[in-house]
Image: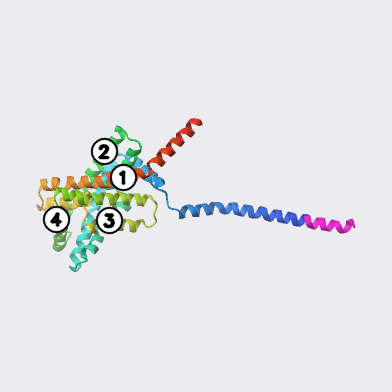
Amino acid sequence: MAEKIEPEIRRAVEENESRRQQAESDRKEKESNEPDEEEAVREASHLSAKLVYQVVRREGDEELRRPQTSLFWSGIAAGVCISFSVIGEALFKTYLPDVKWLPLLESLGYTFGFLIVIVGRMQLFTENTLTTVLPLFARPSLYNLWCVGRLWGIVLGANVIGCFIAAGFIAYMPTFEPDILASITEISKHATEHGAWIGFAKAVPAGLLIAALVWMLAAGEQENFFIIILMTWLIAAGGFTHIIAGSVEMAFLLLTGELGLMAAIFGFFIPVFLGNVFGGTVVFGLITWGQVREEVHDSTDQHGATTQSD
């Protein structure tokens, strides 16, 4: 009897051990797959508004810590390269037939300069109307306000210098055919012919759209190329005014004698500057800060409480 029972016991033990080993193998396989699953979920998920804010704020902190010479030369490069927005528009205007829908296609040329500047990570003033003010909203102080003002002054000044360099090249070098120069003149007059109030009003949406573009790029969208094209095309198609791209047009008219200095400063530059800042900082920046303010403060308070308990 014992001889019959022993093989059955041995078989039961072996089956038990086999099941245990299989369960252990399944557990290890599951653990090894969990990080991949978590990574896939993380990649598939969109960043929350709070995380996007943190990305933009950190970029702003980095910009505020950059050396002045780096900001200056990067700003000049952006001012020069943004001229390809005006050149791109002029090329479309010159070589396409004069039809009703031409402004929509012509506006596609406006995206060229912005693509070069944004993808090339150059310093464009209107991007800083959001990135550098979010750290100021989070930590308001006279010192941070001074840091933002210093960066704005350096970048805006450098951008304008770059715009004048590009405008001088367009106006005085035998690079472009007369019909293209005529198109640049017409486009430039159209951008700068409005009075101060209309110039301000048209600049507000442009400032908001650039700030929204910065926010969308910080969200980590994969279609960055198309987002830049879409948002900057909308600025041109809507007839909105951008202080840096518009400065190329203003400088070109000044250098060719088509625009007076007072009209350029008080009729175009200052109103458009204020409109871009209002749209990018006051409208979009404050709305953005408002939607994450409580979450940011709560996380800061929790971090502070954890630090104190430690």
Q: Badge 4: how crowded within 10 Å, few (<14), some, or many (20+)?
A: some
Q: Nearer the viewer, mark 3 or mark 1?
A: 1
- Residues under labels 4 and 3: Cα distance? 20 Å
Q: Badge 1: how crowded within 10 Å, few (<14), some, or many (20+)?
A: many
Between discs 3 and 1, the one toward the N terminus: 3
Which numbered marker is on residue 232?
3
Considering the numbered disc 1 on the image, is that residue within a helix, a strand or a loop? helix
Which numbered marker is on residue 89?
none
Which stretch appears magenta?
1-12
Considering the numbered disc 4 on the image, is that residue within a helix, a strand or a loop? helix
Where residue 14 sits, quadrant-wise, is bottom right
- Residues under labels 2 and 4: Cα distance? 31 Å
The residue that disc 4 covers is 189
Residue 9 falls inside the magenta stretch: yes
Between discs 4 and 1, the one toward the N terminus: 4
Instruction: Give amino acid for label 1.
Output: Gly
Instruction: Give amino acid for label 3.
Output: Thr
Q: Position of residue 272 (x, y in %)?
A: 20, 48
Between discs 4 and 3, the one toward the N terminus: 4
Of the pair 289 and 30, the residue shown nearer to us: 289
- Residues under labels 2 and 3: Cα distance? 25 Å
Of the pair 300 and 255, the residue shown nearer to us: 300
Residue at the image position 29 percent from the left and 42 percent from the top: 70
Q: Is residue 161 above or below residue 91?
A: above
The residue that disc 1 covers is 285
Between discs 2 and 4, the one toward the N terminus: 2
The residue that disc 2 covers is 149
- Residues under labels 3 and 1: Cα distance? 19 Å
Q: Quadrant of the N terminus?
A: bottom right
Between discs 2 and 3, the one toward the N terminus: 2
